[in-house]
Image: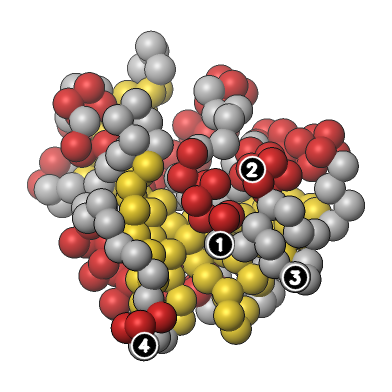
Amino acid sequence: MNVEISKAVLQLNRRFYRLFAPQFSATRQRPWPGWERVLARHADNPERLSILDLGCGNGRFAVACDQFLQCPWSYVGVDDSPWLLGAARAQLSELGVANGWVEAADLLASEDSLPAGPFDLVVLFGVMHHMPGGGARRTLLARALRRVAAGGCLAVSYWQFGDSARLMARTVAPAALGLSAGEFGPADFLLRWGEGEAVRYCHHCDPTAASRLAADVGATVVESFRADGEDGGLNLYHLLVPGPVPVAEAGRTDGE
């Protein structure tokens, strides 16, 4: 995907989350089941668990932390949608999270645009499918990985919408928005959202491509599983640590 097309689809998605943030947020109120499995690795952390939520949206991952963590925790959420950041800020206030805040940032703008950390747990949930092109996906994954503290991990979800006939029926030809189909890769799509004409750019990152991304940024996948949705497999999760780890220390890998 060339630079101009990348800019066009990023602008398309920014416009979506500017115009439809309240409606989108209303459909994203409950934590995903897969998050409980991620948090279970840290539920009994003996010290305060520091969390960075990249692409935090309305802050519902903080709700999952409140539900599933038994240890003290701190939280920083980052997003570039003003409305969703406002909702996340209100969510933290409602939960009474004393060590939590949100801030505005473009995840692809620069290295310095993101909180430096390090953090015990960095999460990228519902984000990677909006990154146009392999370069953008590698850049964001590498930046997130650099914010992981020693002994911590990065948890990433990859939306497996390409495996769903129902979701693929919502695809829109790029030409409908004045974009060239020839500039899209075979895993790049425009998807209608809701019952109207709202459209987002989404990339289907399958298990092989997700594993390749981890290798490209020098990470080790210590656990892989699928969860969420009606069939329990709508998202592929990777739990990553920087650098190689001994095989005996790697966690269970299933669902790929």
Mark 4 or mark 1: whose residue is earlier in sequence = 1
Reading the image, the residue beneath label 1 is: 41
Instruction: Judge the density around disc 4: few (<14), some (14-19), many (≥20) Cα neighbours within 10 Å.
Output: few
Mark 1 vs mark 2, CA separation in Å? 13 Å
Residue 2 lies, in percent from the top left, at 24, 59
Residue drawn at (60%, 28%) of the image: 29
Residue 190 lies, in percent from the top left, at 27, 34
**In front: mark 2 or mark 3?**
3
Mark 1 or mark 2: whose residue is earlier in sequence = 1
Reading the image, the residue beneath label 2 is: 64
Q: What kind of residue is marked 3? A: Pro
Residue drawn at (15%, 51%) of the image: 185
Reading the image, the residue beneath label 3 is: 46
Reading the image, the residue beneath label 4 is: 246
Q: What kind of residue is marked 1? A: Arg
Disc 4 and disc 1 in contact, CB within 8 angstroms: no
Relative to 20, is 39 above or below? below
Mark 2 or mark 3: whose residue is earlier in sequence = 3
In this rendering, does residue 157 appear at all? yes
Disc 4 and disc 2 in contact, CB within 8 angstroms: no
Q: What kind of residue is marked 4? A: Pro
Mark 1 vs mark 3, CA separation in Å? 12 Å
Q: Secondary structure at mark 3?
A: loop
Where, by quadrant of the figure, is residue 13 drawn?
top left
Q: What kind of residue is marked 2? A: Ala
Q: Secondary structure at mark 2?
A: helix
Left or right for 198, reference 161: right
Mark 4 or mark 2: whose residue is earlier in sequence = 2
Residue 245: give its label: none
Instruction: Judge the density around disc 2: few (<14), some (14-19), many (≥20) Cα neighbours within 10 Å.
Output: some
